[in-house]
Image: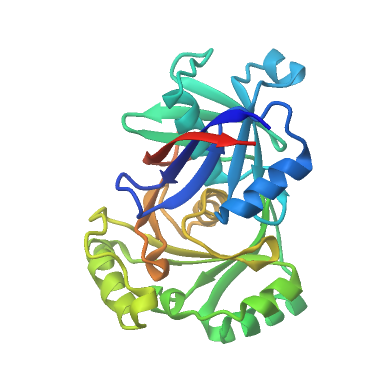
Amino acid sequence: MRTRPFHQVDVFTAQPCLGNPLAVVLDGCGMDDDQMQQFAHWTGLSETTFLLPPSPQGAAQGADYRVRIFTPGAELPFAGHPTLGSCHAWLQAGGQPKAGQEIVQECQAGLVRIRREGAKLAFAAPLLKRSQPSASLLTQVAAALGLNARHIMAAQMLDNGPVWLGLLLDSQQTVLELTPDHLALKNLGQIVGVASIEPAQAATTLIARSNREARAFGPRHSAPADASPDSTELEVRAFAAPIGVNEDPVTGSLNASLAQWLIAEGHAPTTYVASQGVCLGRAGRVHIAQDDGGQVWVGGHCVTCINGTVCL
C-alpha cells in the first residue's frame, strides 16, 4: 500500500452535487485488477478510474495518459463521464497535453480525443455499431420497464464499448414516470437507455415542467430547486443493474450513442442539450454537437468536490 493522489469530481454539471460523481486515483501504477475492482466496489460510485502512463503503442499514437474504468462490479472498455472527469482531474493535477488544446486519452476501447471548449470539456464519440434488437429482448425489457408497445417509437442496440439497448419513447412524461424492475433487468443482463425528444417550441419550458413532474413522484424523486436553466431538447435515463448500478445519474457513453443514432435517423438536431438525473435529484446537462465532418462531440462541465489522497 502507498499514498496516492485522489480526486472526486462531479461531471456534467458546473455546480457540485448535481451531476455524476467520479472517483479518480491519479496514480494507479502497481495496482492489479483485483485491487482496482475492490476499491471501485468500496467507493460505491457508478465509476472509479485509475490513471496510468500510456502504453508504448498508445504513446506512439499521441496518448497523453491511459485510464482504466471500473464500475462496482466490472471493468468497462469506455465510458463517457469517466472520460471527462478523468481528463479534468489530470489537467487539474498539472497534466500537459502533447497537442495543445486537444488531449488524447487511451482506454481499453482505444484512443479518445478530448477538446477544451471554454469552461467545458468534450470528447469525440467513439465509433458506434448499431443493430436491431431481437423482438424477444425488446418484449422482456419493455415488461421490466412497465412499458406498452405504444410508448416505444424506435429501438436500437448501441455499441460504443458498452452495449446499450436504446429506446426512444413517446414523451418526457413516459421517461420520468418509469419505475423499472431492476432485478428483472439484471437477470436479462442488458443495460438500457431511454430518451424522449421535446419539440423545439417546448424546449424552454422543459426544466420547470420536468422538475414539477418529478416532484409529484415523492421526495425520492424531487429535482433540485436550483437546477440549471439550460434549455434542453432530450430527457434521458440510464438503467444498468447488470453492472451494479440501478440508475446512472448522467451517462456520457449512452448520450454519445443516442446522439449518433438519433441525429443519423433525423430524430434529433445536430446540436442540442440533454437533461439527465431528474429522478435522482440531479440536474445533469450533456452538450451534443456534430461538426462539419460528421464527428459527434459530447461535452459538459466538471467540478472537483474532493481533493486529497488515498492509501492503496
Residue 175 falls left or right of residue 136: left
Q: Nearer the viewer, residue 187 or 271?
A: 187
Residue at the image point whose x is 41% and y is 40% from the top: 306
Q: Is residue 221 above or below residue 110?
A: below
Q: Nearer the viewer, residue 131 or 247?
A: 247
Residue at the image point whose x is 65% and y is 36% from the top: 312
Residue 65 % position (x, y): 61, 23
Quadrant of res 245: bottom right
Residue 126 % position (x, y): 62, 39
Residue 167 % position (x, y): 57, 68
Residue 297 % position (x, y): 48, 39
Q: Is residue 119 above or below residue 79?
A: above
Answer yes or no: is residue 150 visible.
Answer: yes
Residue 67 falls left or right of residue 33: left
Answer yes or no: is residue 71 visible.
Answer: no
Residue at the image point whose x is 50% and y is 46% from the top: 22
Residue at the image point whose x is 77% and y is 44% from the top: 34
Quadrant of res 147: bottom right
